Amino acid sequence: RTRVLTGITTSGTPHLGNYVGAIRPAVNASRDPGVESFYFLADYHALIKVQDPARVQRSTLEIAATWLACGLEPDKVWFYRQSDVPEVQELTWFLTCVAGKGLLNRAHAYKAAVDKNREAGEDDDAGVSAGLFMYPVLMAADILLFNANRVPVGRDQVQHIEMARDFGQRFNHLYGDAAAQPFFVMPEAVIDENVATLPGLDGRKMSKSYDNTIPLFVPRETLKKLIYSIVTDSRAPGEAKDADNSNVFQLYQAFASVEETTAMRRAFADGIAWGEAKQALFERIDREIAPLRARYDELIARPADIEAILRDGARRVRETYAAPTLKTLREAVGLRDLS
Ligand code: TYM
C-alpha cells in the first residue's frame, strides 16, 4: 500500500492553512483503501520555537482533537505523538551523520534567520539555535522512519522533503548493497495546487509566526469578525476587482468547488463589494467547518480520552514499524543489537 505521512508542529492553535495544506488532504487520502496513513503531532519540532511547556501541551491536545474532529479514524490509521516514538531521535542522529552541512546552510528557515541578522548588522548566527539548523534532519527522520511515499504539505515544506530524499539517498548509498532492497524509499511532496500557500489576514502566508492566522475552530461569530478583518485594497463597490491578487479570493478558492470559484471570479470582475465577498467567504468556510467544530468542542472536553488514543497509537506504531526498523539500521551502521 502507498504510505502517506504528515505532521503538524505543536507550537500553537491549528489554523485554516494547516487544515487546507495538510489535514484535509491527508484525511481524504486516508479514506483510500490503497493507502496506509501516518499522522503525528510534531512536538520535538515545537521545542525549536517554543520554550513554554504549557503551550506545547495545550497545542498537542488541540491539534490531536483537530485531527480527530476532521475525520481521522484512529483505528484505521497510525496516529501518534512524535515524542512517544523515541526511535525518531535515534534515526535523526544517523541522518545527522550523513547530512551535508552545506545543504542545511541553504534551508529556508535557517537562511531567513541569517538574513534577518545581516539586515540588523548582527553576527550571522546570533540567536540561532542548533535545533533550528537541524530542523530538516529531524523532519527527514519522521518521514524516512516509516518509508512514507507521499507527504501532503503546504508549499513551505517542499524543500524539507527534498532534503529528506537527499539524506535518505546518501544513507542508502553509504550503507546499502546495490543488489538488496534500499533502506529508505524516496518520499514525494503532495501539494494541492488550489491552496499551495494560503494567505493570512494581512496577505502574507498564513502563519503562527506572522500572527495573521484564522484559527480553524473559533466560534462562528469570531470567524466572521476575523474574515471581515482581512486586508483588501480600496476599490469601491462596482469597480472590477483583481481575483488573482486577492487574498479573499484565494481563501474562497481553497474551500469552494470549481463552479463556485468560477462564479466568484466573475463576481470579482463585475465589481462585487468587499463586504459581500467577505460574507460569501465566511458562509462558505462556515458551511464546511461547522460540523467539524461541533465535534471538536466535544473532543477537547475529554483530554484523557485523547491521551489514551495517542499512547495506544504510539505503542502500536513502535512495535510494528519503528523498533524493527531501528534494529535493522543499528546493525547496518555497526552498532550493537539491543534486543
Ligand atoms: P507546520 O506545523 O508549520 O504546518 C503544518 C502543515 O500545514 C501547512 N501549512 C500551510 N499550508 C498552506 N498554506 C499555509 N499558509 C500553511 N501554513 C501551514 C504546512 O505546509 C504543513 O504541511 N515541519 C512541519 C511539521 C512536520 C512535518 C514532518 C510535516 C514535522 N515533521 C514530516 C510533514 C512530514 C511544520 O512545521 O509544519
Image (tube, rainbow, N blue to C red):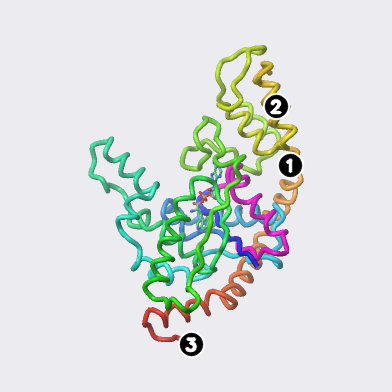
Question: Magenta stretch?
Answer: 13-38
Going by the numbered disc 3, the residue's amino acid type is Ser
Q: Is residue 28 magenta?
A: yes
Label 3 Cα crowd, 10 Å radius (few <14 / some 14-19 / many 20+): few
Pick the quarter of the image with the N terminus.
Answer: bottom right
Cα distance in 3D space between marks 2 and 3: 61 Å
- Circle number at residue 339: 3
Q: Would you name the residue on which mark 2 appears?
A: 264
Secondary structure at numbered mark 2: helix
Specify which label sits upstream in the sequence, 2 or 3. 2
Secondary structure at numbered mark 1: helix
Residue 232 placed where, x, y %? 57, 22
Residue 70 placed where, x, y %? 70, 52
Q: 197 left or right of 26?
A: left
Mark 3 and ligand 1: say if the CB distance to the nearest ligand atom is below 8 Å: no
Mark 2 and ligand 1: say if the CB distance to the nearest ligand atom is below 8 Å: no
Going 39% across and 46% down the picture, which residue do you hit? 108
Going by the numbered disc 2, the residue's amino acid type is Met
Specify which label sits upstream in the sequence, 3 or 1. 1
Q: Would you name the residue on which mark 1 appears?
A: 288
Going by the numbered disc 1, the residue's amino acid type is Glu
Q: Quadrant of residue 102?
A: bottom left
- Circle number at residue 305: none
Camera-nearest label, 1 or 2: 2
Residue 8 placed where, x, y %? 55, 54
Q: 242 left or right of 290?
A: left
- Contact between marks 1 and 2 (CB within 8 A): the answer is no
Secondary structure at numbered mark 3: loop
